[in-house]
Amino acid sequence: MQLPEFEFNTAALCRDNRVNNCPEIAINVPGVVAIRDSEEPGTVVRMTPDGWTTLTDAIKAGEFDLSASA
């Protein structure tokens, strides 16, 4: 089964032309959340909606706070 083409979107802050290297997210394919880097659009990470929720919850909780590891 071939997946339909992902329709990637960026966060509002990344739509400013002065901002580079933004994450892009696609949620248009049922059961799949796709993530890519705007500078590497050929590399796409796919996960389930539950995996996406786990990831975003961890980010919100500070588990991946890069400033804490500096």
Image (spheres, rainbow, N blue to C red):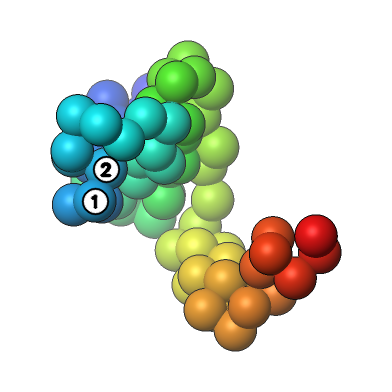
Is disc 1 surrounded by few (<14), some (14 to 19) or many (20+) residues within 10 Å?
few
Looking at the rendering, which quadrant does residue 59 occupy?
bottom right
Viewer-closest of 26 and 48: 26
Residue 46: where, in percent of width, then height? 52, 42
Residue that mark 1 sits on = 13
Residue 65: where, in percent of width, then height? 66, 68
Q: Residue at x 27, y 43 (%)?
A: 14
Q: Given the current orientation, which residue lies at the most extreme top position?
A: 42
Does the CB distance between marks 2 and 1 fall below 8 Å? yes
Viewer-closest of 42 and 19: 19
Q: Is residue 58 left or right of residue 32?
A: right
Q: Residue type at mark 2: give it.
A: Cys
Q: Residue type at mark 1: give it.
A: Leu
What is the count of numbered marks?
Answer: 2
Q: Is residue 21 left or right of residue 45?
A: left
Q: Is residue 35 above or below residue 50?
A: above
Q: Is residue 59 above or below residue 22?
A: below
Residue 51: where, in percent of width, then height? 57, 64
Q: Label 2's element? A: helix
Q: CA distance from mark 2 to mark 1?
A: 4 Å
Q: Residue at x 81, y 64 (%)?
A: 69
**Label number found at residue 51:** none
Q: Is residue 42 left or right of residue 18?
A: right
Is disc 2 surrounded by few (<14), some (14 to 19) or many (20+) residues within 10 Å?
some
Looking at the rendering, which quadrant does residue 8 occupy?
top left
Residue that mark 2 sits on = 14
Q: Label 1's element? A: helix
Residue 48: where, in percent of width, then height? 51, 57
